[in-house]
Amino acid sequence: MPIHLRRLWHGIISIFASDTISAPWSAHGSYPVRAGNGIEILIDGQAAYREVSTAFHRAKKFIYVTISFGSQDFLLIPESGETLFDLLRSRRKDGVDIRMVVWEPARQTPDTIPDPAPATISGINDGSGAIQARWDRAKGYKGWYRSPHGHFEPVLLDFPAEMGCHHQKTYVMDDGAGGVVAFVGGINPVQAYWDTTAHDSLDVRRVARGEDPLKGLEGTPPLHDIFYRITGPAVGDVVANFVERYNGASIRHGDMTSDVAAPVTPDQIPQVPDGIKGQVLRTIAPETYAATPKGDTGIREFYLNALCAAGKGTLIYLENQYFFDHGIISEIHEAAERGAKVIAVLTSKPDEGSLAGAVEGVLERIANFQDESRLVAGHRNVAILTLGNSRPDPRTQGKVVNSETYIHSKNMAVLGRDWAVMTGGSGNIAFTSMWFHSEMNIAFMDRDLIKNWVAQLWSEHLQIPVAQAVEPVDRPDDAFTFFQQQAIRNKAALERGLMPEGRVYYREGTTFPPRKFDGISLDPSPVPPGG
């Protein structure tokens, strides 16, 4: 379709999108839209894993865990000293059926738990009363990469299995009182991913056991991420995903594990009173599991539908680690062309110094060869930002310790005048995540809830009260200006060595200093303000 006709079509769409939205959902995904769900946002690792730990302790019948990156020594609540695997082993001794499906990388990859066969991990696959775990190798992808609206010419992609990843992070269990609960998000059970809303660069609780605290903190910046706690019928779909993946795992350990039947299905789960509509979304590579031979690109479909509905008077707020799915970026550009305000909070240097980071950099540069990708960054209605954090330097009065905050969250909210949709989970804005990495998101509609959650995120990033952050959510122009102005002031403060007023910076043109903590005496168990 010629570009002038596309713009005319999207201009017509935006007239209606400003007033209402009827169908942002994925029509071709594995699971339908379900009514009557309870959804709660858990911002950053401390809040998220406190809830997960509580749910582990309450479960009486089953706990199903999906791991991509992970550590056996991960401390859900660092002060407790109880590791993830110790907790799961303890619950298994209490008679809870515990099963895990774990990503098996094609090559050695940091922060993963490889299959130990023929040996076993203590308490896992080592007897009839043990935890049952299966490992799963990911597929690659070969096929045409197309824009559903003709925004760019199709590109033939051919990614080997070495680039595939089972990237989902989910926990689902009974709640000990006749119900079920699920957690869907992006926070890996690795200590460096655990953090508080304070994002204190000197918080040693982010350092793995046995690692030198100073070197650990110098090597890992604070990290922002999100989980969602889900109750209601949508939990049944999280269970179904686990069952499909566990039973279809590529490394089954058939002599030590058995297939599992779903302990509960969506029709068996009562709706939550005053609950909201929600949909469990996935990415699954084609020919990975027998029940999904064509794969699933439901996350991408939802993104495209929600963005296509955005026009003048609409606010698009997103946080993401990556930014190189050109189909989604082109839709963001089209929304901005129609007058939507876009606030994008992105990682400053994703996976810097790693193989994954090098690959990501190449992929992002390839995406930026497309005209609309370049136009997004400089568009008058788009602010591409990142996050930093600052604290007094304990070595010298009046000095400031500055660091980037690694943005690992993957969420997007689109808010019209009287409607809003939101999605979040493990799916990055990357054509790897949108086409063939295994991913899971939750999507939902409820304007008041979404408005409040966006305000909570803005309160953390802008360092203002939630009550103050709520107001500009309804005024996209004012919100856009607020973020821009703070980014400018914070960069000036960073360059002058002064304490910034918040945590928002422009992504381009901002360089955070190396983290050098020589001479700092660390409290072995600090609880910083807000932590």
Image (cartoon, rainbow, N blue to C red):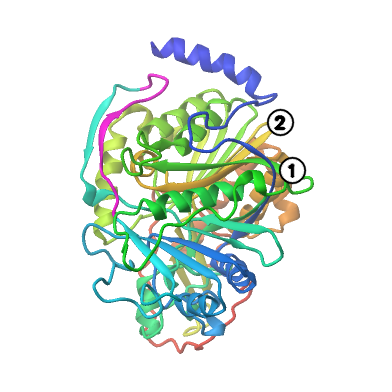
Q: Which residue is mark 1?
A: 448
Which image quadrant for residue 329? top left
Q: In the drawing, what numbered circle is on residue 132?
A: none
Q: Is residue 59 magenta?
A: no
Q: Amino acid at mark 1?
A: Asp
Q: Is residue 465 above or below residue 21?
A: below
Which image quadrant for residue 100? bottom left
In this rendering, the count of numbered labels is 2
Q: Residue at the location (51% across, 85% down)?
A: 81
Q: Which residue is mark 2?
A: 417
Residue 42 shows in the view: yes
Q: Is residue 489 above or below residue 53?
A: above
Q: Give the foreground label among 2 and 1.
A: 1
- The secondary structure that most of the magenta stretch takes on is loop
Percent across and percent down for residue 298 are 47, 36
**Magenta stretch, residue numbers:** 137-151
Q: Where is the C terminus found, in terms of image quarters?
A: bottom right
Percent across and percent down for residue 166 are 36, 53
Percent across and percent down for residue 142 are 24, 35
- Rate crowding at label 1 as few (under 14), some (14 to 19) or many (20 or more) other CA atoms within 10 Å: few
Q: Earlier in the sequence, mark 2 or mark 1?
A: 2
Q: Amino acid at mark 2?
A: Arg
Element type where label 2 sits in the image: loop
Q: Is residue 139 magenta?
A: yes
Q: Is residue 406 above or below residue 200?
A: above
In the shown orientation, is residue 216 left or right of residue 379? Answer: left
Percent across and percent down for residue 344 are 50, 44
Q: CA distance from mark 2 to mark 1?
A: 11 Å
Q: Residue at the location (31% across, 39% down)?
A: 287
- Rate crowding at label 2 as few (under 14), some (14 to 19) or many (20 or more) other CA atoms within 10 Å: some
Q: Residue at the location (50% across, 24% down)?
A: 337
Q: Residue at the location (35% across, 55% down)?
A: 349
